[in-house]
Image (cartoon, rainbow, N blue to C red):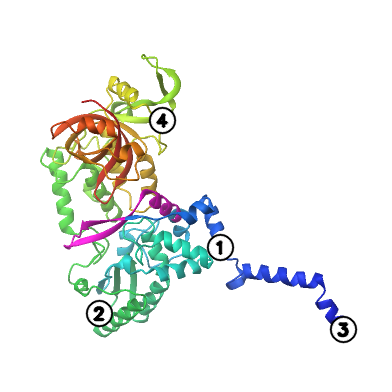
Amino acid sequence: MLDSIGEVLFSPLVVTAIIVLVLILRCFKGRGGRRELSIGDLADRLKMSKTNLVQHDAQYRTATIPKRSGGKRILHVPDDATKQLQRKLLQQLIERLAIHDCVHGFRKGHSIVDNAAEHTGQAVIVKLDIIDFFPSTNSDRVKNAFRGAGFNKSAATLLTGLTCHEGGLPQGAPSSPALSNYVNKNMDEKLAEAANKRGAVYTRYADDITFSFVTYSRHNIHNLLIATGKILRHYGYRLNNKKKRIIRQHRQQLVTGLVVNERVNLPRKTRRWLRAVKHRMETGGEATLTNSEFRGWLSLLKMVDGDSPLLTFLDSPKPKAEESVTRTRHIGDNISDSDGHSSLSDSDSSVVHQGKSATEGESLPTNTPPETPPVVASGTILPTDGRRQFLRLARLGADGNLALLQLVEALNQTEKYSTNRNEAEKDLVGSEYLIDISVSSIGRTFSFSLPEDYQDGQTLKGTLRDGGLSLELYCDKLVGSELAGLSFPTRLKVLIRVVQWNSIFKRLEAIVLHTTL
């Protein structure tokens, strides 16, 4: 009988079935037999080849920007290819991962107003700040977070390499803010539990932690601060004790820049300042804000105080499209212009605005605020003959200064790392404009991300004429050698194709397709 059982167990059919079963089980790990996602699955989600994904070499450059509180903030900015890949990861993966409800920063549908609203009418506010938040979010925790999201070891390792730099999340990468929210989900849960245990409300906006209490209790506040310090240290963070604030109700309580004593509102000082700016704009005085910046402030005010008389500025009439734009068409289709060259088609149009743009320091008429950005060509790089495009737009009297200003202004009104921001950048990159510029200097180009002809060319630095927008324009070797002989400062009319909006240095970067001397 035993012999019969042995024959059955070790028959070729049974052995094969066992091997197949083992192989299947290896593919299913974790709770509920969930299949772990592989590098191939990740490549499919990103619509990339597995080879290109694995072989991607992320490069970063270091930059510094001043802090509002003094000192400098070090940024690690990814190269264009890495930035694009990180944005894909952000849209297709990271933004879809669950985070704690107490987090309001870098989250769709949430803002500083939502963060502040959680703490209205409280007896005491406790504000804390995490030191070096992004770099301190170490790569081991990021890898474990990706494993928890269902990726196998190889895929999690690859994702960590694509999103981390020098052992942590790089401040300057588009993926870092949203990824930090997911990585810290367990930490936020523990902080929320610690707060709830002591009768407090907890929220986090990036590196800003806020607790609020219905009643003042020195004992509860003290214990919560001790517990918070322990939790943060466990996850690799440190508190900035210089920025610790405990604010009672008899003082102005500010959370993420908004007053929360009774309801969410802008500080009185800010509202007075905005009224003064509005008065100067209406009376022709010197304004301290551009039209777009002022409207951005009013949009925030509208979220917290919809009845404010300042909001009449937002309701002022907008200019008619036919009065502000001239439509042109791209070269390359079957319509011929007066020179007999291939002309422009209606099916792929951009907008080039005419006229002078209002700038900071000038009177801005309230009846023509640039609220809606113009429709421009998407990021497709067009096979444009620079000279023919330049001449045609010049004959039309086209001036792209206003169009470019409005598009950049619209971009700056969007929240960083948001979907709206990404879409606005897509509209800007690759679009072409005939513009007037004031050039302050010229120097050698140092960039390996530009087309080959431009890598050893010259870089123009200056501003958009009458617009104040900072520019960095890259010329090929031929054009660069011609411009190098000019005396600076000088004015030029150039045809450009936008490369990117550099949000760190607040400047537009583009290549020069054609110019006249």
Location of mark 3 (residue) = 3
Q: Closer to the observer: label 2 or label 1?
A: 1
Residue 32: x %, y % from top left: 61, 71
Q: Can residue 306 be seen in this view?
A: no
Label 4 – label 2 distance at C-alpha: 67 Å
Looking at the image, tell me whether mark 2 or mark 1 is earlier in sequence order. 1
- Three-letter amino acid code of the residue under disc 1: Leu
Location of mark 1 (residue) = 37
- Three-letter amino acid code of the residue under disc 2: Tyr
Looking at the image, tell me whether mark 2 or mark 3 is earlier in sequence order. 3
Mark 4: few/some/many CA within 10 Å (<14, 14-19, 20+): few
Mark 1: few/some/many CA within 10 Å (<14, 14-19, 20+): some
Label 4 – label 3 distance at C-alpha: 79 Å
Location of mark 2 (residue) = 216
Label 2 – label 3 distance at C-alpha: 80 Å
- Three-letter amino acid code of the residue under disc 4: Pro
Q: Which of 463 and 458 is in front in this view?
A: 458
Give the magenta part as a residue range: 61-89
Label 1 – label 3 distance at C-alpha: 43 Å
Left or right of residue 320: residue 184: right
Asked if residue 81 lies in the magenta stretch, the reply is yes
Label 1 – label 4 distance at C-alpha: 40 Å
- Vertical position of residue 426 compared to residue 83: above or below: above
Quadrant of residue 435 in the image?
top left
Quadrant of residue 86 in the image?
bottom left
Location of mark 4 (residue) = 383
Element under disc 1: loop
